[in-house]
Image (cartoon, rainbow, N blue to C red):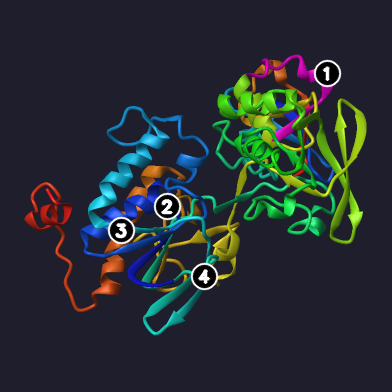
Amino acid sequence: MSHKTDVVIIGAGPVGLFAVFELGLLNLNCHLIDNLDKIGGQCAELYPEKPIYDIPAYPKINAQELVDNLIKQAKPFDPTFHLNQQADSIKKMDDEWKITTSNQTIINAKCIVIAAGAGSFVPRRPTIENIELFENTSVFYSIKNKVKFRNKKILIAGGGDSALDWAIDLASIADVTLMHRRKEFRASPDSVSKMLELEKNKKIDFVLGQLSALLGDEKNLKEVQYKHEDNEYSMEVDYLLPFFGLKMELGPIAGWGLNLHENLIAVDTEKFETSVPRIFAIGDINTYPGKLKLILSGFHESALMAQKCFAYCYPEKKNVFRYSTSSKDLHKKLGV
Amino acid sequence: MGIIKVKDRQDKFHQLDAEHGSTIMEIIRDAGLDIEAACGGCCACATCHVYISSEWVKKLKQIDDDEESMLDQAFHVTNNSRLGCQLEYSEDLDGMELTLAPE
């Protein structure tokens, strides 16, 4: 799939969403790329129900509500979202960038805005020696095709929604054991009762424990050792599916040749541009003297970044500064 | 002002100044030790997982449901496991010893 747009925004969190609005006011179209399956970044993934108290004009707003409002605010500018994929590589083509995602989506854009927060969300990998040897043959953090699990001995580790949902799903085709450190689950009540029902009917085995070692030959896992309250146990398995939530890492962006300071992207404070022209960084991912990692800082950075993007996208045009309260032109764009 | 003693992942001890009102995570992070604290301290990840030395565990406030649930995303959890962001330093914790959990 190939697309063309003015600006590609990497990260669909609150700051990326507000950037769509600020760029939209200047007639710039945006595509957004995010590794999550939903819009909203950390606000939607980590703490949707938690209140935020330092958004201007909102004495209190829940993180998901903030995201929903930002989506609504950006809607007149009709952004295109490419979810479930990571921005993998970029290539300079004359006065454009060609961005390729992990799903092989290709987007040509005049500017890139990195609004990636603390990085992209990737599965949290258990801290067990040698686990990487078995990854993608016997150890999987996500499931694309479940046929290979048919009639196999599967160990699912974790106590959240993903662990329970997959345990329930795979119980009908495989020999499933669910392992968790306690018999309480941080998952939807419906999934918990389904799982307990399947356990009662001996369709799922449940064991208390935490992974401690993996044994196998070459890439094929044979045995998992685990601990519970200082006792050690082991079991034979064909596949291990660990579900311990997500973590954030900078990922491929680290290799794009931008000046970095301790995994943050250095920018100026006039345009929030990186050391590479036409690539900007806004929000928690950037750093400059006095930087505060606040959503409101990211909003400010969006507005200033948009001015420079406009200059890159329309070098021949003069940008007339207008207020949204009074400008008929802006009202037209906003559809009000 | 008091101190806490933190053992890092290379088994090296660090004596850190601790001020009333800061969380254990903040004290460790602001001293520049390697603690990820991805969510910034709102009990929404488990990347400030620490082991409190046994004699100090009982002096801490009880673990609540939120913290216990987040520990489900940590590895090698023990009875001494806590999330640093949920522990506020106060004078009665002066001298507390703890260890950073493996990454």
Q: CA distance from mark 3 to mark 4?
A: 31 Å
State the image coordinates of residue A75 (x, y, percent, origin top left).
26, 51
Report the quarter where the N terminus of chain A lies: bottom left
Judging from the image, mark 2 belongs to the subunit labelled: A
Judging from the image, mark 3 belongs to the subunit labelled: A
Residue B47 vs residue A157: left or right?
left
| Residue at (76% x, 52% y) in the render | A139
User: Which dot marks residue A304?
Assistant: 3
Find numbered disc 1 in the image and state the secondary structure of the residue it sits on. Answer: helix
- Which amino acid does the dot numbered 1 rest on? Glu
Q: CA distance from mark 1 to mark 2?
A: 45 Å
Query: What residue is pinned by disc 1?
Result: B55
- Quadrant housing residue A250: bottom right
Query: What residue is pinned by disc 4?
Result: A104
Where A17 sits versus B58, above or below?
A: below
State the image coordinates of residue A124 (x, y, percent, origin top left).
67, 46
- Which amino acid does the dot numbered 2 rest on? Ala
Where A145 sits versus A159, above or below?
A: below
Find numbered disc 2 in the image and state the secondary structure of the residue it sits on. Answer: loop
| Residue at (7% x, 55% y) in the render | A328
- Does label 2 or label 3 sit earlier along the sequence? 2
User: Which dot marks residue A12?
Assistant: 2
Find numbered disc 3 in the image and state the secondary structure of the residue it sits on. Answer: helix
- Which amino acid does the dot numbered 3 rest on? Leu
Q: Are marks 1 and 3 on the same chain?
A: no
| Residue at (64% x, 55% y) in the render | A145
Taking the magenta stretch, the answer to whether it contains residue B59 is yes
Q: CA distance from mark 1 to mark 4?
A: 54 Å
Which residues are the magenta region?
B49-64
Within-10-Å neighbours for mark 2: few <14, some 14–19, many 20+ = many
Where A168 sits versus A328, above or below?
A: above
Question: Is any part of residue B19 visible from this angle?
Answer: no
